[in-house]
Image (cartoon, rainbow, N blue to C red):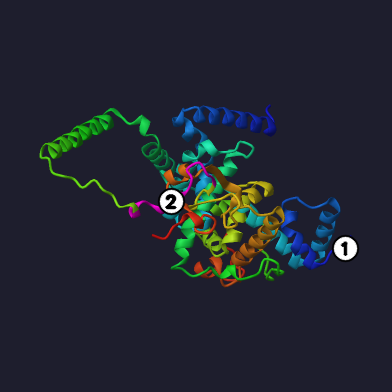
């Protein structure tokens, strides 16, 4: 049986070989190089732009930029990290344009250094993941995520949804690992608060789940 | 080791990630046994990580992969233009060439002079000047510039290359080249 490490090594040497062939002129292989990461690219763009069409457009643009600049890719970095950095930059640029017309999300205000105190709730233990079969639950989770400030959303999506390591998340966002951990803590606590029964936000008001009326039962 | 509620909240995220020492883990668990509020916070965070980490939460729009592939082929791989593409290009070149012939034979004087002032200001930048480009941005900078956005992903190239790729000079670090006409 192959270990995860062996699989990783296999994947990365395959990637190195692809990169070399692309740089040597086999440009059509670029899609093969990008394909394993195309979902992550979209998710990263969506975490910033919060609009599917905009996110897809930004994802395409980012991939095209990566292709155009593949000659300048420094191979001491991971290709996926570099690709996601380009994506984040592209999405942020578009977001700045959006912001000229939109309001800041509510959760952007608290200062990162200040203490975040979780709200006190009736518990919501052991939520079975089968509830995700229901569209309205997924929508509610996405809506709660969209309420977080951008810097929390970016970290949360890369780390908890795309399951990147703390180190990789830090590298992609060009912040310290300590900042990743602080923002992740904040993001998780805020999401829990937004989604807990009894709180007047998240799925509770939208779906009229009263306190004690657990949506997953 | 004893911990209070505040300490539990501060470490809750690390705890869920398994990123705490065995001693701290034990202390947190002991505290949570006697503190329903903290037990709720920890359970809530586990749910958040588990639910959002589910694949069903990271769906991409239908057809996303195909559209990406197509865009890549259309925009970036002109070398793979199909037979019809070449035919169209060939036909167009004949038409354009023909048009020039007609223009020349009609011997209409086309003004040749172009004002010096219409030269773009960025012509003044030495083409082989080493610059940095922040992907996703629109500017190119001197490596010493302080206003490079996300320096970690910046790539090095010559000024000429940057201009060819559609980047414009940073108005701060490359100001001396930007002549006001």
The quadrant of the image that shows the N terminus of chain A is top right
Above-or-below relation of B173 to A195: above
Instruction: Name the residue: 86% across, 54% down.
Output: B23
Above-or-below relation of B90 to B180: above
Gap between marks 2 and 1 measured at Cα: 65 Å
Where disc 1 sits, the SS reads loop
Chain letter of mark 2 equals B
Give the quadrant of residue B181.
bottom left
Q: Is residue A49 left or right of residue A214?
A: left
Residue B104 on image: x %, y %? 15, 37
Instruction: Name the residue: 63% across, 52% down.
Output: A174
Chain letter of mark 1 equals B
Above-or-below relation of A58 to B37: above
Within 10 Å of disc 2 (Cα), the crowding (few <14, some 14-19, many 20+) is: some
**Residue mark closest to the camera, 2 vs 1:** 2
Residue A159 belongs to magenta span: no
Which residue lies under the disc numbered 1? B2
| Of the pair A15 and A195, the residue shown nearer to us | A15
Residue B36 is tagged as none
Q: Which badge, 2 or 1, is on the more N-terminal residue?
A: 1
| Of the pair B173 and A41, the residue shown nearer to us | B173
Residue B84 on image: x %, y %? 25, 30
Please report the bounds of the magenta region as a residue range.
B117-131
Q: Are marks 2 and 1 on the same chain?
A: yes
Which residue lies under the disc numbered 2? B122
Q: Is residue A30 visible?
A: yes
């Amino acid at each position: 049986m192959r270990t995860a490490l062996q699989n990783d090594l296999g994947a990365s040497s395959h990637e190195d070989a692809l990169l070399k062939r692309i740089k040597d002129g086999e440009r059509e292989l670029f899609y093969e190089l990008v394909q394993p990461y195309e979902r992550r690219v979209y998710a990263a763009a969506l975490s910033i732009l919060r609009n599917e069409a905009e996110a897809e457009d930004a994802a395409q643009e980012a991939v095209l930029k990566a292709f155009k600049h593949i000659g300048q890719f420094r191979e001491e970095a991971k290709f996926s990290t570099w690709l996601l950095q380009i994506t984040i930059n592209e999405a942020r640029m578009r977001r700045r344009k959006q912001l000229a017309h939109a309001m800041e999300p509510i959760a952007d205000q608290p200062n990162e250094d200040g203490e975040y105190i979780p709200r006190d709730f009736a518990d919501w233990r052991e939520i079975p993941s089968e509830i995700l079969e229901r569209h309205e639950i997924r929508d509610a989770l996405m809506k709660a995520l969209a309420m977080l400030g951008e810097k929390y959303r970016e970290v949360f999506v890369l780390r908890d949804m795309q399951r990147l390591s703390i180190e990789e998340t830090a590298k992609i966002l060009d912040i310290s690992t300590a900042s990743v951990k602080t923002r992740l803590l904040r993001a998780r606590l805020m999401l829990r608060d937004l989604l807990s029964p009894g709180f007047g936000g998240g799925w509770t008001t939208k779906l009229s789940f009263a306190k004690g009326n657990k949506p997953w039962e | 080791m004893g911990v209070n509620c505040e300490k539990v909240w501060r470490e809750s995220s690390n705890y869920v990630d398994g990123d705490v020492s065995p001693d701290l883990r034990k202390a947190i668990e002991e505290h949570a046994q006697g503190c329903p509020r903290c037990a709720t916070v920890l359970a809530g965070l586990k749910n958040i990580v588990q639910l959002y980490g589910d694949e069903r939460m990271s769906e991409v729009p239908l057809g996303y992969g195909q559209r990406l592939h197509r865009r890549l082929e259309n925009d970036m791989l002109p070398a793979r233009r199909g037979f019809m593409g070449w035919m169209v290009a060939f036909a167009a070149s004949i038409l354009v060439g023909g048009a020039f012939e007609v223009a020349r034979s009609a011997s209409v004087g086309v003004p040749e002079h172009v004002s010096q002032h219409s030269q773009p200001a960025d012509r003044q930048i030495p083409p082989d000047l080493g610059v940095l480009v922040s992907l996703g941005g629109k500017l190119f900078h001197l490596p010493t510039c302080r206003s490079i956005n996300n320096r970690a992903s910046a790539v090095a190239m010559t000024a000429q290359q940057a201009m060819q790729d559609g980047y414009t000079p940073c108005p701060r670090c490359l100001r001396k080249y930007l002549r006001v006409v």
